[in-house]
Image (cartoon, rainbow, N blue to C red):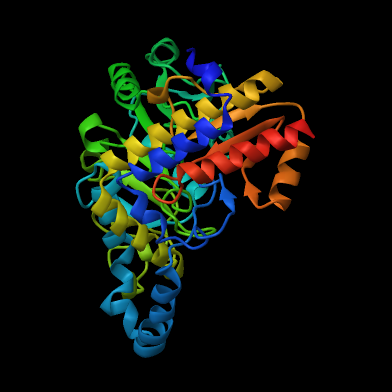
Amino acid sequence: MDARMENHDGATLLEQAAQLDAADPLARYRGLFIGTDTDLSYLDGNSLGRPLKRTPRDISTFIEEGWGGRLIRGWDEEWLDLPQTIGDQLGRAVLGAAEGQTVIADSTTVVLYKLIRAALATVADPARTEIVLDTDNFPTDRYLVEGIAREEGLTLRWIEADPASGVTVEQVRDATGPATAVVLLSHVAYRSGFLADLPGITEVAHSAGALVVWDLCHSAGSVELDLDGAGVDFAAGCTYKYLNGGPGSPAFAYVNRRHLPGLQQPIWGWMGRKDAFEMAAGYEPAPGIRSFLSGTPAIFGMLAMRGTLDLIEEAGMAAIREKSLKLTAYAVQLYEAWLEPAGVELASPRDPELRGSHITLDHPAFRNVTAELWEQDVIPDFRAPHGIRVGLSPLSTSFAELFRGMAAIREQLRR
């Protein structure tokens, strides 16, 4: 029997969800997150991850014992080192980065600004006046580079990206050359979920004599990364998606150690100075990755992600990626059985290996459908003009939860 025809049987698909959950080696982690013991279907982990059940306790302990007990002594005893301590754990558990190359700071926008300006400052060839980026990158990336190009008198070379797929190695090869200074791309496309060939694109950019800055917002914590192995120059990403840092938790910056000596970022602040408490005239950058700090670290914003990093180190990114592949494959299976016949289009690659941990579905009714779904405690993410993103966080999303959410989308369309 044709698999797609068989999948029209809702009972069969529900049984499949139960079987997948029963065989899931990461299933035990789901119960560690707040809200997973309810019937709510959360399909937006790629925008904001669920909090861990340990997070209220961690924050309460910090308030009572750290902030309340140690008061300002906490800065000397631990807090000043947290951006690098947690950065090293993030590098080790998620990024494939040796210690001393990752720091927690600022927002993704600010971190990207620092990295791009720092990268440009290392380019000695005056003929390299172009920044390469793509038309479907996340808006903040595009706006940011447009502003930097205006500041520096540089030219933007746009790659016309297919919104249903993403930027390919061949496109980068065609767009780069003797005039390229920096390439800025997202590893996972925010709209389609397309997974770019990070090692291949990095190699092509380097062959053209350019530096690469990667946006890892949609891949950190859901896709295996080996930044050191791929020779990545610079990378940034947020921590409130698959790292569950909470709304507005600070971003991270990765700088390959070969670039750190002599590298200067443009936002000089006291916390990135050689001796922050010397309070002396003149700015002398701290050695290493600490120089990428500017202002006082957002300690509260770092606390929640530590729990998720502990879980990722325990579970391993290979297992997390494996579940992500199965979740998106099952989501596409449900789409083919229920939504494709209703005129919904899949705006993501069909090959699971070419996807991050979300898929996008397009239908003209989806703006209103999303609003109705939210009222029913089914929470996907709407992206204009008419896309629903189904974001699946491997540590906290079950196959049964995904089944319920996709079934609700089908029912809402029927209405």
Quarter-wise, where is residue 150 in the image?
Answer: top right
**x then y, percent, for residue 208:** 32, 16
Examine the image and state in which quarter residue 227 appears: top left
Horizontal placement of 374 versus 141: left or right? right
**In terms of depth relative to the viewer, which is nearer, 97 or 404?**
404
Q: Residue at 36% x, 86% y: name it.
A: 65
Along the viewing direction, whichever of 141 and 200 lies nearer the viewer: 200
- Looking at the image, is 92 positioned above or below residue 213? below
Quadrant of the rendering where the C terminus is positioned: top right
Q: Position of residue 140 (x, y in %)?
A: 57, 40
Identify which residue is drawn at 39% across, 60% down: 305
Tell me: residue 336, above or below residue 397: above
Q: Is residue 337 left or right of residue 58?
A: right
Q: Between 191 and 50, which is closer to the camera in this rendering?
A: 50
Residue 188 picture quarter: top left
When the figure is inspected, residue 389 is found, relative to residue 169, above or below; the finding is below
Residue 219 percent coordinates (x, y): 41, 38
Residue 45 in sight in this render: yes
Give left or right: position of 282 versus 131.
left
The answer to whether 378 appears left or right of 190 in the picture is: right
**Is residue 373 placed above or below 335 in the rendered structure?**
below
Q: Residue furthest bottom?
A: 69
* Percent x, y of residue 93: 26, 49
Q: Visible in this render: residue 192?
A: no
How many numbered tags mark residues here? 0
For the point 27% across and 62% down, the residue is 85
